[in-house]
Amino acid sequence: MINHQPLYQSPQGDLWGVFQAQKDEEVIHVREQIRDQQGQMWTDVSAWYWAALLGHSQGPWWAVTEVRWSGA
């Protein structure tokens, strides 16, 4: 099961997309964001995709994913 969580704001003010994946007693907590060279940030792939496709962002882009596992 995938559960989307509220956005996370880091102490530096960066926003991260957050979700949890769960199977039985295992839970994985994931944060993700995409950045471009100009300093723009997106909290999900679809928002970044449309910005890039429409020319509102130029690469290179960096995708950062943080994963924390809570096992059984």
Image: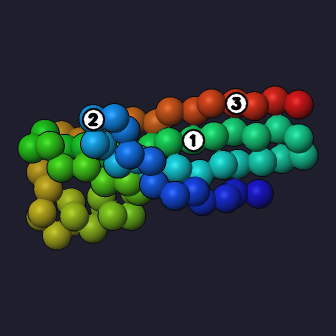
Marks 3 and 1 sit apart, C-alpha to C-alpha, by 9 Å
Q: Looking at the image, which residue is at 16% across and 70% down?
A: 54
Tell me the tag on residue 19: none
Kindly indicate whether the residue at mark 1 contacts the one at mark 2 (C-beta within 8 angstroms).
no
Marks 2 and 3 sit apart, C-alpha to C-alpha, by 24 Å
Label 2 Cα neighbours within 10 Å, binned few <14 / some 14-19 / many ≥20: few
Q: Position of residue 14 (x, y in %)?
A: 30, 43
Q: Is residue 59 visible?
A: no
25 on left or right of 6: right
Q: Is residue 59 above or below residue 68?
A: below
Q: Is residue 46 visible?
A: yes
Kind of residue sitting beneath label 3 = Trp
Kind of residue sitting beneath label 1 = Val
Give the secondary structure at mark 3.
strand
Label 3 Cα neighbours within 10 Å, binned few <14 / some 14-19 / many ≥20: few
Tell me the tag on residue 69: 3
Kind of residue sitting beneath label 2 = Gln
64 on left or right of 68: left
Q: Position of residue 15 (x, y in %)?
A: 35, 48
Give the secondary structure at mark 2.
loop
Q: Position of residue 39 (x, y in %)?
A: 14, 43
